[in-house]
Image (tube, rainbow, N blue to C red):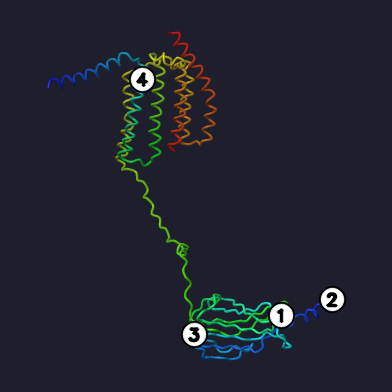
Amino acid sequence: MHFLSTCLLSLLAISNVYAASLTLQSPRFTISSPDATQLRSEPLSTTKKPSPLVLGAKDVLKLTFQVVEEEGKGVQPHQTFLRFYDEVSGEEGIQPVRVTTGGKAKFELNMAKPPASLPPTTSTDPLKVTLIIGSFTHDPFKVDLFDLFLPASQPAPQHPDEPSFHSLPEIHHTFRADPKLPPKFISAAFAGLVLAPWVVLLGLWGAIRPTVPHLFSPNILPFLATLSAFEGLLFWYWVDLKLGQVLLYGGILTVPTLVAGKQALSTMGKWRTGRK
Amino acid sequence: MAPAKTHQSQQSNAVHSLWTAYNQSTSSRLKTVDAFLVFLMLSGVIQFLYCVLITNYPFNAFLAGFASNVGQFVLTASLRAQVNPQNRSEFKDVSPERAFADFALGSIVLHFFVYNFLG
């Protein structure tokens, strides 16, 4: 435990020695118009932001500074970025800055030829400009430099496919009206018409008067009974039963039907050949 | 209009003689079956007329009824053909009893499907 704490302390001491902090020396910005007249030139402070800068459509902003350690030695950090951030819309753009080995850096923003990394700007909201420095051997360093008003940018061009990604108009289904039954009189009349052929059938059979000499013979009757039972089962299925039940009962009924049928039809065959 | 009259009377004579021949030469059993066939045909025609003229609204009902008529007609016609003693030479290996058994089985299966479709 004692050994561990001394180890940690020594580790902290070593890391302290390693991590020096960075700062800026003599940061300065200059805004000049296209014909090289200086509009504004001020030194920057790392603690207090100046009044917001305003750039016209063709003005040039020059930024110079030197990155130094606490003792004043110039340092070339591994990463130096300027971040342009629009707080209202949330857009940001990052611009790397070239730093010499001595730590001297110079950044120029020419609005006549703006870099592609600038975020879209509006005429009313400023861009917050921040300097971000990263180094393997020093603590990271970030400073808010100033607020910048740039001319408003063009709106983003619309992709030709973009309208197809919006939601389509809502579909309102129109349903067909329910089918209607014809008037009761017509229904009744045609019901009577459809049942009329039964009358014709009964009339014809009455005229023909077919004889059924062996209808109630004990050889024939069971077969007719089982056939009628089948028809009754099917009617029962129509009004009440389910498919599984009717198939089961039908399967059961098949057995006596086959037996009775064999008996009846063989008897009929014998009578027919006997008569012949 | 003498030729037209004789033509018509010839026609009616032909129909009349056909009818008389049919009546005399067909057995009563075959006539029974024929009456059933006529009944089926009438029933089917009237159902079809209703569907065409009025409405086909419960379409499954129309199909079930019409199919039952047509199916039963087919089965009965085949039974009549097989049972007719004058056709013995064409149906040597199908006895009339076998024909009737086929007819009964086919009718039961047809009725099952028709009841199924009627709903």
Q: Please provide percent x and percent y for residue B26.
A: 33, 15
Q: Secondary structure at mark 1?
A: loop
Pointer 2: residues within 10 angstroms few (<14), some, or many (20+)? few
CA gap, disc 3 and disc 4: 111 Å
**Point 24% across, 18% down: residue:** B16
Dividing the picture into quarters, in which one does residue A215 lie? top left
Pointer 1: residues within 10 angstroms few (<14), some, or many (20+)? some
Residue that carries the numbered disc 4 in the rendered image:
B32
Q: Please provide percent x and percent y for residue A216.
A: 45, 17
Q: Are marks 1 and 3 on the same chain?
A: yes
Q: Please name whichever residue, A12 or A245, is drawn nearer the observer in this view of the structure.
A: A12
Residue that carries the numbered disc 3 in the rendered image:
A56
CA gap, disc 1 and disc 2: 22 Å
Chain name for mark 3:
A
Residue that carries the numbered disc 2 in the rendered image:
A7
**Point 43% across, 60% down: residue:** A170
- Amino acid type at mark 4: Thr
CA gap, disc 4 and disc 1: 114 Å
Q: Are marks 3 and 4 on the same chain?
A: no
- Amino acid type at mark 2: Cys
CA gap, disc 3 and disc 2: 59 Å
Q: Secondary structure at mark 2?
A: helix
Q: Are marks 4 and 1 on the same chain?
A: no
Q: Please name whichever residue, A265 or A66, is drawn nearer the observer in this view of the structure.
A: A66
Q: Please name whichever residue, A78 or B88, is drawn nearer the observer in this view of the structure.
A: A78
Pointer 4: residues within 10 angstroms few (<14), some, or many (20+)? many
CA gap, disc 4 and disc 2: 119 Å
Q: Are marks 4 and 2 on the same chain?
A: no
Locate the C terminus of chain A and report the quarter of the image it occupies: top left
Locate the N terminus of chain A and report the quarter of the image it occupies: bottom right
Nearer the camera: disc 4 or disc 1:
1
- Amino acid type at mark 1: Asp
